[in-house]
Amino acid sequence: MSLMNITKKEIKELLTPSTFVPIVVIALLFASMGNIMGGMMEEGEEKPVVGVINEDNGKYSEMAMLVLKDNAEIVYNGSDMQGGIDEVTKNGGSAVLRIPGNFSYNIDNNIPGTIEVVWIMRGVGLMDSISSSVVEGVIQNINTYISHDLVEEKTGMEPHHLQNPTAKEETIMFKGKEMVGINPSTLGGMLSSQSIMLPIVTMMLIMMAGGAIISSMGMEKEDKTLETLLTLPIKRSSIVTGKLIGAATVGLLMAVIYMLGYGYYMQSLQTAELNLADYGLGLGISDYVLVGISLFLALIAGLALSLLLGTFAKNYKSAQTLLFPVTALAIIPMFVFMFTDIGNLPLLFRGVMYAIPFSHPIIAMRSLMFGDYQIVIGGILYSAIFSMVMIGIVVWIFNSDRLITGKIGKKESILEKLSR
Amino acid sequence: MRVERDMKKDMIEVESLIKKYGEITAVNGISFDVGEGEIFGLIGPNGAGKTTTLRVLSTLLKITGGEVKIAGKDLEKEPEKIRKMISYLPEDAGAYKNLTGREYLAFMAKFFDGSNGTDKIVKKGVEIADLGERIEDKVDTYSKGMKRRLLVGRALMIDPKLAILDEPTSGLDVINAREVRQLIKKYATGGTTILLSSHNMLEVDFLCERISLIDDGVIVESGRPKRLKEKHGAENIEEVFTKVVR
């Protein structure tokens, strides 16, 4: 009953507009960026709006017109450049293409046939250049189409074969697994969303929940509520547990909101869906349970560490300063594992990464793909021991004079200096 | 230094209490006892050891030496049992600013009676705090005086056996302070033992049946206010205090 009481109070104290609104705003920003990116992708797939002035009656301009009709929306097909520009502008198009009278003649006589392009530019933003790149693609298609015709006509050979006389069959050998029909860059691309998402989820979770619990301790000190709390008939370990559960709930909620926005943004960047299970890299339900346990224990370890640092806080402001070590420990594995695997690190750095409990969910995800359960179970055990030790120290501090007197020993520690 | 008092059952027994912070001795072998339903005051200059003594008795700080018993229970061995009987009001204490006054009282009440008794306790807290409709507002919006009233309400609403009050009227205006003093007196009559510290000599004179003057961690004088005034030929406790401490 007392535990639930203190947990509910923690959630009420932490879940205020001032902590909640910034996260919602960031999530909405990500979601809006995702919308914009999605819009850009869609625009890139749409046919560009163009005008055409064809002054050539030859074979190759006919081919060019065929390609244009298939790949673009022609809103003007006439002979007046100004008329073409006006019409394309009116229809929100991006270019007027002029095929001069000597287009086919020049190509037949080994001189490049020129297509003149008058671009109608509306802005310098990322979105404003998309339609022009699509038109560039259409012009490239015209070039390829005519090139194929010329190759076939001049040599009598199949143009595709002539341009691609060799082919490759690929197989990746990685951590004892054989993956046929895929190359490292494609595989890397397939795994990239996970390489980015899980480290970011872990980092956000630790930072949000850690920030919540350190703030809670800072507020207790600043508002001078801790002295009263410690004289209530509730075990000190229950106070610690209530704070951990409250902060974990708030941190989890904030991380979910953040990740909803971020996930939407990331989804908008994905162009093709590939199935990892086709290459023997899929995860089963038990694997996801292990990743979940690993993530949960990393969260508890982060919270316990944050609470320990929070006991040194003098007020809310100094609590934010004390969050720095936790933030650093959460950010380091995120960046490292975004770029490489644990196995590729020098021995010393590998040891450092293993010592940071927040590394283990990321290591677990990758190890499980390759059936390396030992490292995952080891990581879970390590995180559990780390959490227990941290919680033990926190309970010991809560049972000592430390929270009231602000001192551990005779000498002032670095954290005590930082907390001032 | 023990002093005479009515033959009441002991609520607080302090024997040669020592509290050190590292090499600094904050309380140096003080002894006193307080009977059930008595109002006892600790008076002394800043840094004399008053707050440290109150913190030790409210189970916040561990003792370095000596012995403390509250309602016959040893402070070192049974702090959790003691916490069920006491209520501590620290000087400059605050309340959770994102809760309303009523929510704060309800939160505190649940630690003492988690079943169906909390409504009664909260009702009592609301009455003592006497904040009117503002009890439904967030603590963050309260003035210092309103916060103090809420905290006094919180300290007394549970009918503690022992209320330890560090500067109970700190931050209150004259009228509110007077009301709080009357409340404290009323609760003592009802059986609650009160141990308080105060800088306000008028308050001490009005409230306390007995007082101890503490200076540099040592009790330098103890007794009933009237007798102390007679002993030192002083008109009021302030004068006694000045004469003893000088």
Image (cartoon, rainbow, N blue to C red):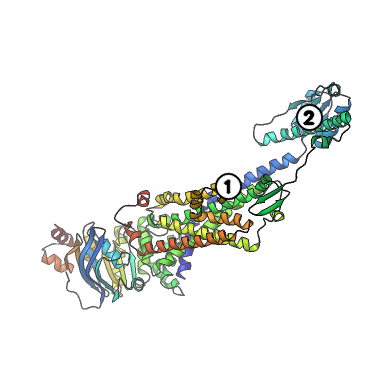
Distance of label 1 from label 2 (alpha carbons): 52 Å
Please give the residue where the numbered disc 2 appears in the rendered image.
A87
Seen from the viewer's position, the closer of residues A154 and B174 is: A154
Q: Locate residue A116 relative to residue B41 in the image: left or right.
A: right
Badge 2 density bin: few <14, some 14–19, many ≥20, Cα 10 Å: some
A348, above or below A402, in the image: above
Look at label 2 and name its amino acid: Glu
Circles 1 and 2 on the same chain? yes
Q: Dot 1 corresponds to which residue?
A: A340
Quadrant where the C terminus of chain B is found in the figure:
bottom left
Disc 1: host chain: A
Q: Position of residue A303 (x, y in %)?
A: 47, 58
Q: Residue at x 35, y 62 (%)?
A: A227
Q: Quadrant of residue B7?
A: bottom left
A245 horizontally vs A126: left or right: left
Left or right, residue A247 beside residue A104: left
Question: Mark 1 belongs to which amino acid?
Answer: Thr
